Image (spheres, helix red, strand yellow):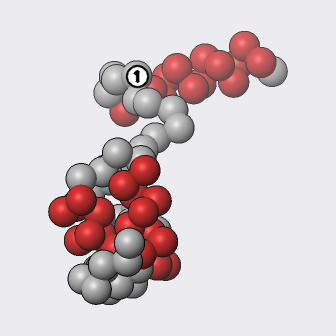
Amino acid sequence: MPSPNIKNEKQYEGLRKKGMSKERAAKIANSPGSSKRGGQASGSGTRRDKPSQGGTTAQKREAGRKRRRAAG
């Protein structure tokens, strides 16, 4: 049932199916520019393909040098 308070009903329903609360889904669906972002920029956090393994920048640089030497 469409709610008069929800601007983007399709996006709202999609967010609800993903398990988001009614209040949060409504805020995202009603935010300006939400259809362009798909709700991604509103508190969904950052996602990384490869999580960081730690270490200092110098350690990572050295590990890269070692890999290049081993491959070449």
Picture quadrant where residue 60 is located: top left
The answer, for residue 60, to whether it is visible in the render is: yes
Q: Nearer the viewer, residue 70 or 17?
A: 17
What residue sits right under mark 1 in the picture?
A: 53
Identify which residue is drawn at 24% across, 53% down: 21
Residue extending furthest front? 1
User: Element type at marker 1?
Assistant: loop
**Whole-percent x, y for residue 51 in the image:** 44, 30
Picture quadrant where residue 52 is located: top left
Residue extending furthest right? 72
Amino acid type of disc 1?
Gln
Q: Is 3 displayed left or right of 10 in the figure?
A: left
Quarter in which the C terminus is drawn: top right
Image position of 33 with respect to 14: above or below: below
Identify which residue is drawn at 77% across, 18% down: 71
Quarter in which the N terminus is drawn: bottom left
The answer, for residue 37, to whether it is visible in the render is: no
Q: Is 18 displayed left or right of 69 in the figure?
A: left
**Whole-percent x, y for residue 17 in the image:** 43, 50
Identify which residue is drawn at 49% across, 23% down: 62
Q: Nearer the viewer, residue 61 or 11?
A: 11
**Dot 1 alpha-carbon crowd within 10 angstroms: few under 14, some 14 to 19, many 20 or more:** few
**Whole-percent x, y for residue 44 in the image:** 32, 53
